[in-house]
Amino acid sequence: MERFRVAGGARLAGEVTVTGAKNSVLKVMAACLLAEGTSTLRNVPDIGDVPIMAEVLRGLGAEVTDAVPEVRVTVPAALGYEADYEHVRRIRGSICVLGPLLARCGRARVALPGGDAIGSRALDLHVSGLQKLGAAFESEHGYLVASAPKLRGEQIWLDFPSVGATENIVMAAVLAHGTTLLDNAAREPEIVDLCEMLVAMGARIGGIGTSTLEIGGVDELGPTTHDTVPDRIVAGTFAIGAVMTLGDVSVRGARAEHLRLPLDKLVQAGADVEELPDGFRVSMDRRPTAVDVVTLPYPGFPTDLQPLAIGLASISEGAAFVTENIFEGRFMFIDELVRLGADVRTDGHHAVVRGRERLSGAPVRATDIRAGAGLVLAGLVAEGVTEVSDVFHVDRGYEGFIEQLRALGADVTRVAADDLLG
C-alpha cells in the first residue's frame, strides 16, 4: 500500500554505487544446489527477490543465511526436489532451480512461476532443452513435474537465445554424462557470471561469453565463493536519469562494457559519457534529442531498459520509434506514462513517442519493476507531484532506490498508506 511521492524539477547530480545484479543473483543462488556444502555469494543486492529465493532454497532443504551483501547457502547431501507454489509464484527467477534439481536429484516438481506481467515467457525452451538431455516432463495441477534418472550430454539448438533456458540447460548439463553443445545460447553478462561461478565449482564450460557453449559433464561439483556481477540495468537506470534531468551522475561499481549500446544511445541523445576505472559518468546540459531504440538479446539494447528509454523519449526533442522484440507486455506501462502527459502511440510491438518539453504530475501505477523506475524518473521531470503506487515491484529490483535518488538531489519520499489517507 506504500507509494512513492515524487516532486518534479530535480537535477540528479553526484555519485551512486550499484550492487550485484538481480538478474544474476537468483540464478547463482540456485546454482549452489549443485554442490553439497556451503557456498558464499558476495555483492548480493538488498532487494525483495533475494529473501523469496532464499525461502525457495530452504524449502528444498538448504540452510540460507541472507544477511546481504553476503549470502551463504549450505546444501545437504540429501536434497528435496519440490519447489512449492507459495514462494515460486512470487518470482519468475525461481524456475532456475529446475536444472539443478534434475542434475542433483534426478527429479523435480516445481510450481509454475509468477513475477512481472510483461508477457507470456513460456517455458517451452527450458523443457525442450532438458528433454534433449534425457528428462521427461508432465504438467500436474499447476506444477511442472520432471524426471531424469540419468542426464546425458547432447547437441541442443535454441530457437531463441533465451536467458532462462540457457541457465537451466547449463546447470543440468554440468553434471550430465558426456558433453553438451549448446548453440544459440544467450550471451548476457549474467550468463557469463553464472558460468564463471560453475567453473569455480569444478564445472567444465568452454565458449563462455559466446553463443556456443560446450559443457563437459563432471561427476560432482564443490562449493565456492563468488562475487555477483554488477547490475547493468540499475546502472543504466541512473544513466538515463542523469540525461532526463540534465544532470551529472557518476555510476560507481558498474561495468561500462556491459552497456555499450545504451550508453551510445545516450551519446546520440546529446549526453557526455566518460568511462571511469570503476564505472562511468554521464552528464547532460541541454534538452535530449530523440533516438530510436530496438530491443534485442545481448549485446542489443536490453528490454529491461526499454521503459526508461520511452520515458527519456517522452521529454526529448523530436520523435522516437521504439520496437520491443522480447516481451510483448512491456508496453503495459505506457498508459500510465500517458497520464503524465506523454505523447505515445503503439501499434503491435512498435511505439512512436513524440517528445514534449515537460510532463505533468499525476497518480500512476507501477506495472512491473522497470516500469516503476521509469515512472519515478518521469515524475522527476514533471511539473507538480507524481504519486507512484504498487512500488513493491520496484523494491524487487532496486536496492535503496529512493535513498539513492535523494542522495543525488531528488525530492522523492516513500509514503505509507496511512499518510496518504491523511
Image: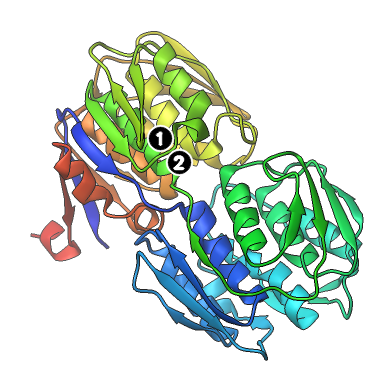
In the rendered structure, the answer to whether residue 64 lies left or right of residue 315 reads right
Q: Is residue 163 visible?
A: yes
Residue drawn at (44%, 41%) of the image = 233
| Residue 386, position as x, y percentages in the image | 21, 39
User: Which of the 4 image quarters holds residue 43?
Assistant: bottom left
Disc ID at residue 91: none
User: Disc 2 marks which amino acid?
Assistant: Arg
In the rendered structure, the answer to whether residue 380 lies left or right of residue 310 reads left
Q: Mark 2 Cα within 10 Å, few/some/many (few <14, many 20+)? A: many
360 to 417, vertically: above or below: above
Disc 2 on helix, strand or loop? Answer: helix
In the rendered structure, the answer to whether residue 398 lies left or right of residue 2 reads right
Dot 2 and dot 1 residues touching (CB under 8 Å):
yes
Query: Dot 2 corresponds to which residue?
Result: 232
Q: Nearer the viewer, residue 310 or 268?
A: 268
Disc 1 on helix, strand or loop? Answer: helix
Judging from the image, the colouring scheme is: rainbow
Query: Dot 1 corresponds to which residue?
Result: 236
| Residue 285, position as x, y percentages in the image | 23, 13
Rendered-image quadrant of the N terminus: bottom left
Residue drawn at (35%, 9%) of the image = 317
Q: Nearer the viewer, residue 123 or 66?
A: 66
304 to 169, vertically: above or below: above
| Residue 59, position as x, y percentages in the image | 55, 85
Q: Is residue 362 visible?
A: no
Considering every residue shown, the one lying at the far bottom of the view is: 78
User: Disc 1 marks which amino acid?
Assistant: Gly
